[in-house]
Image (spheres, grey):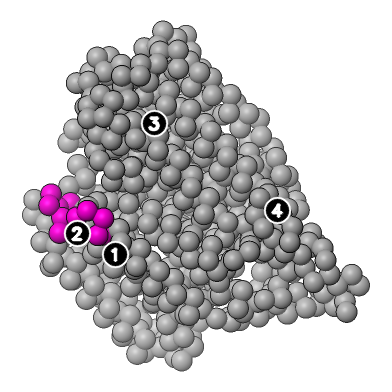
């Protein structure tokens, strides 16, 4: 056994770790046009840039509003969760470095249906993230210069104004489009220097905050745990902590453009995905709580929940530093309030572009999305992501409202790592693994359970909003992928998908939970049993009928992926009755819901692993690997 950044790995049969370029299947021919230009430092910088964006500017206040001083524990807990999750992705990323990797892996083990459903969920996150970073920029600037008219208050919530704030946001999104069109090299090289700035400014801010440290803030308003121990978990998503750690898996999305990916991807996950963000955010959270001036924030001392609507909400760190007597530093923070989220939004638009490109490679979107410009950028995919991103300004034009749903969408993309690793251990045991995790299936199970737990801890409102949007993937699959592949006839598929779409609109609007600014159900919303029952009935009927009209191949793809639909539906039902749901006296109180969630996750993992198997795409890669090995005298027997 040897060690690779603290993770046990095994040597290949010839006694060496394979650093050669991995095999590329015939269906991945477009990958050959991608340019390998991202170094290890550039990859670490991309990870840091994704994570030190709007999160460092706003998440400290958001986390404190959910858990009070105990939010410090939440940051450590988040790092532990993502550390467990990341181990699985280290093996996968080094074994199969691909651009848009998280979208492409499920196709190799579970086929088209699960691949599309997973890709749709990740695409929602990737399209939302540039917008949420723009919202952070506009929020900071608008809060400091209210005369610009960039912000307005609706139902007691500060949001981007229409038209001024939203138009300003769309223009900034277009700047991200221009920058991304020049390719990964410009993105990576420019981002190196931006990342250095993004490290210096947060750490300097933390030091300044410690100069005004008030230890009484750590016990005021109900002690260190003012909302109880459960708030430590709910703050993971609602407090922006999952969002802040979002760069760990996104490292893999540039895998096809990384120099020496087998070495650099695992290193970047550990250094850029975990260690650097943890140090920065812990220092900032402790410093912010210690420097919090309740009077200047305009709220009662110890009223942690009121922070979200306080005078400090639009620019918490800027106000805290100014209150500590360093008003001159506000110029630096305002500059960073534009630079840090903008750099993160720039990176995320690139990630979204590669996700669309990968879904096209998977044959889930038209081949036109693989078209490159002369800089090696999938330009049609970039245009589509930018255009669709504009739509996300309207449902929730506020960072604090959007962050919970986006956090769940990001975490959903981590769920597939465990089942994919376990299935590939069975179906592709001889595929070269530069990093081979000792006890891989156990780590895969742990990462899977951790991912679903993070989703559950997000709470009812972000869950139901995301899952409502997520289930839109079903009619699109039925009308496009199933028909295109010849697994179902066009007329019945289109009729079935159209009926589900109508049912989706009726149920989503009738339920009264979708895109509400106050995060509460509208007064005329349906009772939960009616709402949830209608959703389950519509989804079950769609899948049953699509299965009945599909060919044997189409049915095989549906069987391999239906476990995820059932699992997510069960989580929604459990969340409503659990401690993180909307009920004042939940029937699943204490920790009974967490125990049930753990049992559900374990059962879902083994169902997922059993559902996976060989696919045509995996066979294609394995054949290419055999040909590569046969032509390489160092691996030939």
- Distance in Å between CA atoms under marks 2 and 4: 43 Å
- What residue is drawn where x is 61% and y is 48%? 269
State the image coordinates of residue 460 (x, y, percent, origin top left).
25, 53
Mark seen at residue 588: 2
- Distance in Å between CA atoms under marks 2 and 1: 9 Å
- What residue is drawn where x is 66% and y is 50%? 6
- In-image side of 427 versus 544 (left or right): right
| Residue 306 appears in the picture as rendered | no
Q: Residues within 10 Å of mark 1 (few under 14, many from 20)?
A: some
Residues at discs 4 and 1 in contact (Cβ within 8 Å): no
Q: To which residue does mark 3 refer?
A: 60
Q: Nearer the viewer, mark 3 or mark 4?
A: 4
Q: To which residue does mark 4 refer?
A: 4
- In-image side of 585 versus 95 (left or right): left
Give the SS element for disc 3.
helix
- Distance in Å between CA atoms under marks 3 and 4: 33 Å
Q: Which residues are magenta?
A: 582-593
């Amino acid at each position: 056994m040897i060690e690779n950044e603290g993770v046990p790995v095994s040597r290949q049969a010839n006694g060496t770790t394979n650093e050669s370029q991995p095999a590329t299947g015939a269906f991945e021919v477009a990958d050959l046009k991608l340019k390998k230009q991202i170094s290890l430092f550039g990859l670490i910088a991309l990870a840091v840039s994704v994570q030190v964006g709007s999160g460092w500017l706003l998440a400290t206040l958001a986390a404190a509003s959910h858990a009070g001083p105990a939010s410090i524990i939440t940051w450590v807990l988040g790092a532990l969760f993502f550390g467990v999750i990341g181990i699985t992705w280290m093996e996968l990323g080094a074994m199969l470095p691909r651009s848009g990797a998280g979208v492409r892996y499920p196709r190799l083990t579970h086929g088209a249906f699960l691949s599309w459903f997973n890709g749709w969920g990740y695409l929602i996150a990737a399209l939302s993230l540039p917008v949420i970073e723009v919202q952070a920029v506009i929020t900071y600037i608008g809060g400091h210069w209210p005369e610009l008219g960039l912000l307005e208050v609706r139902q007691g919530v500060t949001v981007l104004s229409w038209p001024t704030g939203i138009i300003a946001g769309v223009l900034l999104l277009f700047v991200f489009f221009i920058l991304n069109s020049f390719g990964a090299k410009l993105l990576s090289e420019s981002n190196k220097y931006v990342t250095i700035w993004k490290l210096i400014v947060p750490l300097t801010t933390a030091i300044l905050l410690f100069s005004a440290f008030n230890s009484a803030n750590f016990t005021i308003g109900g002690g260190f745990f003012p909302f109880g121990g459960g708030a430590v978990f709910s703050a993971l998503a609602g407090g922006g902590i999952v969002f802040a750690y979002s760069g760990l898996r996104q490292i893999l999305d540039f895998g096809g453009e990384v120099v020496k990916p087998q070495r650099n991807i695992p290193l970047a996950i550990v250094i850029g995905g975990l260690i650097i963000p943890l140090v920065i955010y812990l220092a900032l959270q402790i410093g912010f709580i210690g420097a919090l001036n309740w009077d200047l924030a305009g709220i009662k001392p110890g009223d942690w929940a009121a922070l979200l609507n306080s005078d400090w909400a639009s620019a918490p760190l800027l106000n805290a530093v100014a209150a500590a007597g360093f008003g001159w530093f506000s110029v630096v923070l305002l500059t960073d309030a534009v630079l840090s989220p903008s750099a993160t939004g720039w990176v995320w638009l690139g990630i979204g572009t590669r996700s669309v490109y990968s879904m096209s490679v998977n044959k889930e979107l038209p081949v036109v999305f693989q078209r490159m410009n002369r800089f090696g950028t999938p330009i049609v995919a970039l245009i589509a992501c930018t255009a669709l991103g504009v739509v996300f300004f309207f449902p929730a034009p506020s960072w604090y409202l959007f962050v919970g749903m986006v956090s769940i969408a990001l975490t959903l993309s981590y769920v597939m790592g465990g089942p994919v690793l376990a299935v590939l251990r069975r179906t592709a045991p001889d595929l070269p693994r530069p990093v081979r995790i000792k006890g891989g299936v156990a780590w895969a199970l742990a990462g899977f359970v951790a991912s679903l737990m993070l989703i559950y801890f997000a709470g009812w409102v972000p869950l139901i909003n995301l899952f409502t949007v997520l289930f839109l993937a079903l009619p699109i699959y039925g009308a496009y992928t199933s028909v295109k592949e010849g697994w179902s006839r066009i007329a019945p598929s289109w009729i079935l998908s159209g009926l589900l779409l109508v049912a989706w609109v009726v149920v989503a609007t009738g339920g009264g939970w979708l895109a509400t600014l106050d995060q509460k159900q509208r007064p005329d919303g349906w009772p939960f049993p009616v709402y949830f029952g209608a959703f389950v009935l519509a989804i079950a009927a769609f899948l049953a009928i699509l299965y009945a009209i599909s060919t044997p191949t189409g049915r095989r793809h549906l069987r391999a992926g239906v476990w995820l639909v059932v699992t997510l539906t069960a989580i929604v039902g459990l969340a409503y009755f659990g401690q993180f749901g909307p009920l004042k006296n939940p029937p699943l109180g204490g920790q009974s819901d967490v125990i049930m969630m753990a049992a559900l996750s374990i059962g879902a993992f083994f169902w997922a692993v059993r559902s996976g198997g060989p696919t045509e795409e995996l066979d294609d890669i394995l054949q290419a690997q055999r040909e590569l090995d046969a032509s390489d005298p160092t691996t030939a027997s």
